[in-house]
Amino acid sequence: MTEKTNSTTTRLLNFFGRRSILFSRLFARALAWVVNLLHITKTSRAIRLNVEICLSELNEQRRGKITQAAIRNELQSYMEFFSIWGSSAEANLARIHHIEGGHYFHEALARGKGLVLIVPHFGTWEIMNCWFAQYTQMTIMYKPIKNDDADRFVRQARSREQAHLVPTDESGVRQIFRALKQGGTTVILPDHTPHTGGDMIEYFGIPLASSGLSAKLIQKTGASVLFLYAIRNDSDGFNMFIEPFDDRIYQGSAEDGTRMIHESIECLIRRYPEHYHWSYKRFKANPALDGLYHLPHQDAMKKIEQIRTGNTDTDHTHIKNTDSAL
C-alpha cells in the first residue's frame, strides 16, 4: 500500500465514510456537548455573534438555545457529509424519507429551459445531490480542497453521482451557462462572500458584498429556479423540501434578483434558525466590519449597530462586480 492511500487523512475519511448516519450524529452530538459546555472555540464565538446580529429581536435566553442547537446541528451535518460521501447513491436515496414539492422540480425539468437550484448553507444539503442526479445532468462549481486526500475523497463521491465539476472561475461560469442553455441543471450556494467584487446587498439589515452569479445565470438564460433545503429527521434519515421561486426574479436587475435570493434565505433562517450553518463569518463582507470577528462581543455589536443606524462614513452601496464571464 502506498503512502498516499495509507495516509492518516485517508484512513479517517474512509472510517467515518463507512459509518452509519446514526453513528455520525451521535459522534457529532458528543463533540457539540463539549463545545457548548466549555465555550472555548473561535467558531462557537462566531456563531454566537452571528445569531445575535441576525436575531437581535429575540431575548438572550432564546438566542442561547438557538446557538447551542445550531452548533449541534452544524456538527451533525459535517459528520453526515462523510457518511453521505462514503455511501453509494442507492444508500443515500434510501436516506431521503420524504420529499415535499417534488412536482415543482419535474415541472421545471419538463420546460427544458435549464434549472438553477438555489441551496443555502442550511441543514444537510449534500444528501440532495443523489436524488436530482437521477433525472438531470448536474454541472456544479467545485473548489479543490487543499488536502489532496480529502479532495480525492469528495471527487470520488461526486463522480458516483455523475456530476460535472467545473472550476470556480470564469471558465466554470461559462460551462454552467452552456449547460443551462442545453437544458441542464446547476446547484449554487449563494450565501457566501465573493472573492472579489459583488453587489452590496442588505442581509439582516447589514449591507454585505454578495455574489450576483445566481441571479445573472437565471436572468440571462431564462432557466427555471427552485429553492432547496434538507433537514434531518428522527428516523436516521432526511426530509427534502423543494420550493418555487417568485417570478419577479426574471425582472429588474441582477442586483434586484440577488436581493430576492437573500430575502428568501432570511425567511428560511427565521423559520428554522437552529438549522442554519452560522459559523461562516459572513458579516466581515462589509468594509467597515472587516475585523468584526476579532473584536470583543460587545464591541462587535456596537459596530453592527453603527452600520444599521447609518452612523458610519463608509459607502456601502456598491462594490464593482467582477462576474465578467456573464
Image (cartoon, rainbow, N blue to C red):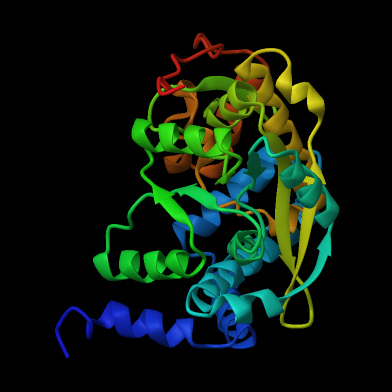
Q: Where is 325 relative to 241, above or below?
A: above
Q: Is residue 235 above or below residue 66?
A: below
Question: Quadrant location of the N terminus?
Answer: bottom left
The reply to whether residue 64 is visible in this rendering is no
52 in relation to 136, above or below: above
Camera-side residue of 173 and 203: 173
Relative image position of residue 100 (x, y in whole percent): 85, 59
Q: Is residue 49 visible?
A: yes
Residue 321 in the image: state x and y as whole percent: 45, 18
Residue at horizontal 36%, vertical 83%? 12
Picture quarter containing residue 116? top right
Name the residue: 58% across, 63% down: 126
Residue at horizontal 53 percent and vertical 68 percent from the top: 78
Against 95, residue 288 (above or below) is above
The location of residue 9, given as percent across then percent down, is 30, 77
Residue drawn 78% across the image and 51% down it: 106
- Name which quarter of the figure residue 257 lies in: top right
Q: Is residue 297 left or right of residue 59?
A: left
The tally of labels here is 0
Farthest residue to the bottom: give it.
Answer: 1
Q: Nearer the viewer, residue 51 or 207?
A: 207
| Quarter holding residue 302 | top right
Question: Is residue 171 shown left or right of residue 164?
Answer: left
Q: Position of residue 284 (x, y in %)?
A: 48, 33
